Image (cartoon, rainbow, N blue to C red):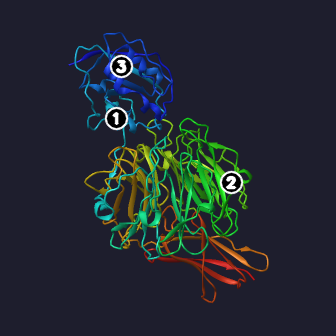
Amino acid sequence: MCRRCRLFSAAKEVVPRRSIQEVDVAAAAAAGQQDAVGALDVAGELGLGDAPADHTVVGLVALADPATIHRSVDEVGPDDHAAFPLLNNVSGKHIWTADNRGRTLAGVRGIRGSITWVAAIVVVACQPTVSPLPSFAPPASTATAAESADPTATPRPTPTPAPEPLWEDVTEAAIGQTAEWTNKVEIADLDGDELPDLLFANGGLYEEPGSPEPARVFRNLGTGRFEEATETIFGDERFLSRAIKVGDLDADGDPDILVTGTFQTSTRLFLGDGSGAFTTAPDQVPAEPLSIGDVEFGDVDADGDLDLMLAEWGAGSPMANAGGRTRLWLNDGAGRFADATDAAMPDVLVRFSWELELLDVDGDWDLDAVISCKQCAGSFLFENDGAGAFTDVTAGRLPQFPNNYEFEAMDVDGDADLDLVTINDGTEPPASEHLFLNDGAGSFSDATPVQWPVTSNPGFDDNNVAFLDVESDGDADFVIGSLDGPDRLLVNDGTGSFTMQEGIIDTDEASGGTLAIAVADLDLDGRLDLVEGQGEVPGHENERVYLGTRIGQDTAPPSVTVADPLATEGGGVVLRARIHDRISPARPIQLQRVIVRSPDGDGVPMTWYGEYLWQVRLDPASPGTWAVCAADASGNETCADAVING
């Protein structure tokens, strides 16, 4: 049965923000006539009116192309909503959205600011000759609703299914039920038992604070099961946190924990004693209330300790404010940090950043930075002068796309420099991801069309990337965590070209809100496991633990690339190397040992200083051929020569 429907409102281009959820949908649907239409003031940017009194507001229509705004919808019925590709049904407090690829977004809270390609919003009003349209999701079919209505629409690619799921869902047995909005996952050995423990950064909603929540911690019992240690470590502390990191910040050999704050709250430092006990150190980090989307550790000023760089988005709503300046806190060597932002960082405002990475982009063995930006025309590349002062060199060196959620760095093509994978920064629907290849001198080019084609790059509301070598063949693959699509695997052919595999996880209930994903061998069986942080989508707040029961054991040794020895005053030498097991981000638990062996066979441990970079100062240094050696968590070892001249 059909009804007569009409569109109201002239074309008006807007970029809807997440505040679309503020529309009083229930009131509009209940009133059902002209006054209700006027009440649908989406994000304060589009006032709608002119609907005659004998029509009922039944939906919103989101259009990717404003030129299609006057397309006829004369015959729209409850069973043939595909007649208009982007019909959003209004029912109670939900707006069920079929986007131009037929995906169903969740209710009001699931409509994300990332849908920046929507160019106009109008009202569909129908004569009340039949009952209002029921709530619906787009029907399951081989063609999406959008494709049925628009034969020119780009079809969603058909992924290569995994021969069988590679990971098994063991969440219930491993950590049980959790209930927070989790933005980041950290994996570290907190108590010195050589077992990977789990930490989750919790609290804070999308663009508003919400209620503070505990940052959960789970200690590994060694059997693939965990016991919660949240109160033992943090007591009754509650946070609004987007990031949690573990590292030795006070140079005492023990792990420390940093929990960042958002929505103008303070970052917290907890110093560890090596046994799993932690003490808060409020006076050792700047107390200024900030909104931190991410933090990275690294020795940016080459003084031998770990400094902090923080992605800050500024006060107020990150979807509406002017942004924030990327912060730099320098370590005094004992875990006390001073704010060096004004002297050392570019005076650039970044609007809503969830991610930054410290990495050497130009082969000079110091730490540069890439900073993602959701609300900017593109993201940022800051170059380090070697002493910890950074310059914005984005122009001409980093491809520009808005809405970037993530950078993840890895050498994907085997040329010994670090390339970048980005997430959710496509400018046209579908909002796909990108692969940027490094030329070795710190300039990146977009290799996506050739090496990560649309057949393997469908574009969902994805959030996070983690590299791993799933086939143990010596190249870096990666997994993607998705909010509204399947978590999936991208397999590298060895040249940096990727093929997608879905169906990689054996679970009774697919995750529906993945915001973070991390990789480690949790049960020490030589196989890599996955941990996911969940949130944002109602009903999908429980974290996930997946054991790699059907992937092969790790047999590939780490990658070791050695820099030319650097002479120092007094006859000493600094040896540096990039060392990783094709897993990101770098974590101490990934490697059993990293040493240099002298010509006489003596071993000297190296120290991690950020990214995948390790160094050691030899003073004095015996001339001859030294060996930089690394063994991964499975015991696979490799060495590379470093020749020190007399």
Q: CA distance from mark 1 to mark 2?
A: 42 Å
Sequence order check: which comes first, mark 2 or mark 3? 3
Evaluate whether residue 519 shows in this view: yes
**Up-down relation of residue 121 to residue 331 (above or below):** above
**Left or right: 407 as drawn, with respect to 472:** right
* Residue plotted at (27% across, 56% down): 507
Q: Position of residue 78 (x, y in %)?
A: 24, 24
In the picture of the structure, the residue carrying the numbered disc 3 is 124
* Residue plotted at (61% across, 72% down): 251
Q: Residues within 10 Å of mark 2 (few under 14, many from 20)?
A: many
* Residue plotted at (56% across, 44% down): 373
**Residue mark closest to the camera, 2 vs 3:** 3
Disc 3, SS: strand
Disc 2, SS: strand
Disc 1, SS: loop
In the picture of the structure, the residue carrying the numbered disc 2 is 383
Q: CA distance from mark 3 to mark 1?
A: 19 Å
Q: Position of residue 198 (x, y in %)?
A: 42, 64
Work out which residue is located at the far front of the displayed protein and give it.
236
**Residue 304 quadrant:** bottom right
Residues at circles 3 and 1 in contact by the CB criterion of under 8 Å: no
Q: Residues within 10 Å of mark 3 (few under 14, many from 20)?
A: many
Instruction: Name the one closer to the observer, 360 or 353.
Output: 353
Work out which residue is located at the far left of the displayed protein and give it.
1
**Left or right: 338 as drawn, with respect to 542:** right
Work out which residue is located at the far right of the displayed protein and give it.
570
Evaluate whether residue 70 shows in this view: no
Q: Position of residue 604 (x, y in %)?
A: 61, 82
In the picture of the structure, the residue carrying the numbered disc 1 is 102
Sequence order check: which comes first, mark 1 or mark 2? 1
Q: Amino acid at mark 2?
A: Glu
Q: Amino acid at mark 1?
A: Gly
